[in-house]
Image: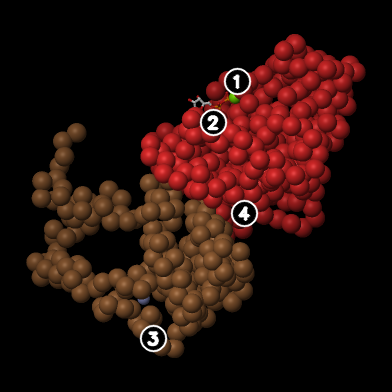
Chain colours: A brown, B red
Amino acid sequence: MANPFPPALDYLVQQLHHLPGIGKRTAQRLAIFLLKDTDENAQNLSQAILRVKKEINLCQECFNITETEVCEICANLRRDKSTICVVEDIVDIFAIEKSHEYSGVYHVLGGVISPLSGVSPEDLRFSELIERAKKPEVNEILLALNPSTEGEATMIYISKLFKSSGKKVTRIASGIPLGAHLEFIDDATIGRAILSRREI
Amino acid sequence: MILKELEIENFRLFPYLKITFSDGINIISGLNGQGKTSILESIYYLALTKSFRTSNDNHVISYNKKHFNIKSNFVSGESDKKVIRIFHSSSEGKHLFINKKEVLKFSEYIGTVPCVILTLDDLKLTLGGPRERRRFLDILISQISPVYLEDLKIYRRTLQQRNALLGKENKGDIKNQISIWNEKLIEHGSRIISNRLDFIDFLNIHLSEYYNKISTLSDKIGVDYQSSLGDKDYLSDRKRIPVRFEKKLNLVFKYEVEKRKTVIGPHRDDVQFFKEDKVFRDFCSQGENKTLVIALKFLEWEYISKERHIKPILLLDDIFGELDEVRMRGLLDFLKVIGQAYITTTMQDKFKTHHTSQKFVLKEKRLYDA
Ligand SMILES: Nc1ncnc2c1ncn2[C@@H]1O[C@H](COP(=O)(O)OP(=O)(O)O)[C@@H](O)[C@H]1O
Ligand SMILES: [Mg+2]
Ligand SMILES: [Zn+2]
């Protein structure tokens, strides 16, 4: 079947399709919407994308997003630096922060181990985590990965990494339904899960 | 569980059909192609959220339609009423509702309406490959335990991940990485094996009795769970399964790297039947095989009803043409003590003298009282 999209539009469809959660059909609908939209809106959108790329970096400590070198959480003197909470993704920090039950710092792994999707331990920020945890003030690694099969396996991997390090490794309690994603769980549930963490 | 009323829409050849059933035996007769199996298929959907004839839900939607709907009223005991609805469309997928509330997880749904089905296809259960027998165990136990269904799901996912790792060209520190998947494989796999063994034990106690009731003979029938973990002795002590699993995984590690896949675990296990001390499938006649399959299905029914305290719905699809007088009588005897059953047949006459049942005739997409 002939492609009904001219090359320029087709290119936009491909770029949109590349975004997480955007299927081919949705990408086409979005592309056509943008095509019909005003020039000004199109300018704004493309500039917004370029601006975040230019102005927002990853925190040198925890890989959270920040406009400075170190993120607000890491720079905050009142945060408890003895506990590092390991999360999969930046959005998980927002979810946990909203519960107001956690006062330590974070470490964004950047994903979970998944041979099926070609993600090996080298692709994630484990060596950075080990470096950070070497500081004497750190005494607890709190694992808050999603309880998917891959999240569970990654937590097992981390607990093995720290086995003989003398650091306490805990995980948030599973008041969280199996297979549910952290970002979709209500604050109270996350809060309770953090309070009732257990050692592994 | 008693299905009182069934309403289907755009399901197979039926644009719309509404039926009120009897609490006991319901016999649906009609010529070939009238839609008898489709009615059982819709009841099976209510139990297991899928078909026994196809793994593609879209095939079940009537030709040229966009969705199907199955609505039903169930009662269990004195007062427990449930309205269950299954909606499926190719664009929106499948949705399950109990009392108008959507149920989002299969493991929270499966088991609500326990069900046992016997079709001609099931004659492969004993003679076909090991996959059929594992499927039999898995469907049965999933209806008893939501944890089992979760275990299966996680085990399969772990297996895929582990096989992907074993299949990689550049293996790196595979020994280290495989160990994290081993932990999950062992945790969930051991529970799966243990649950299967519970049912196998139950079979061993009752199988001869049920077999002989149907065949009117007196043979000794046995079953054996043949685990890829080897050694029988660990089976009696369920707590030793994980230890055994781990040992065996270490033992086959080199071989797995070479084969690039997981070679032991419940996904490789099988069940073997024996008559006296001979392997059943190697010596049995066709008639004996039918007897064994019927006995297994009855015991599936007994096991679910013992574990769940709910009588499963029994579906018998077109099997009476294949049975001689003796086995037919054995079956009908059993039906006396069972809860609700649905029987399809092309031979209405065979049931003429069966007075306790409600009889329907299916013709031109409509159901008539016979
Ligand atoms: N998705 C569908 N839409 C419409 N008709 C269908 C569909 N699937 C199967 N059929 C028709 O249904 C009939 C088979 O129904 P079935 O329930 O197997 O009948 P029976 O068990 O009485 O022999 C066939 O005529 C087939 O063409
Ligand atoms: Mg049929
Ligand atoms: Zn930071």
Q: Same chain for labels 4 and 2? Say yes or no.
A: yes
Q: In the rendered structure, the residue with mark 4 lies on which chain?
A: B
Q: CA distance from mark 3 to mark 1?
A: 78 Å
The mark found on residue B99 in the picture is none
Q: CA distance from mark 4 to mark 2?
A: 39 Å
Q: Mark 1 belongs to which amino acid?
A: Leu
The residue that disc 2 covers is B255
Q: Is residue A97 left or right of residue A199?
A: left
Name which quarter of the figure residue B246 lies in: top right
Q: CA distance from mark 1 to mark 4?
A: 38 Å
Q: In the rendered structure, the residue with mark 3 lies on which chain?
A: A
Tell me the element at label 3: loop
Q: CA distance from mark 3 to mark 2?
A: 53 Å
Q: Mark 3 belongs to which amino acid?
A: Asn
The residue that disc 1 covers is B31
Mark 4 Cβ and ligand 1 under 8 Å apart: no
Above or below: residue A89 compared with residue B345: below
Packing grade of label 4 (10 A; few <14, some 14-19, many >=20) is: some
Name which quarter of the figure residue B8 lies in: top right
Q: In the rendered structure, the residue with mark 1 lies on which chain?
A: B
Q: Mark 4 belongs to which amino acid?
A: Glu
The mark found on residue B108 in the picture is 4
Residue B245 at least partly seen: yes
Packing grade of label 1 (10 A; few <14, some 14-19, many >=20) is: some
> What x and y, as percent, mark residue A48?
18, 71
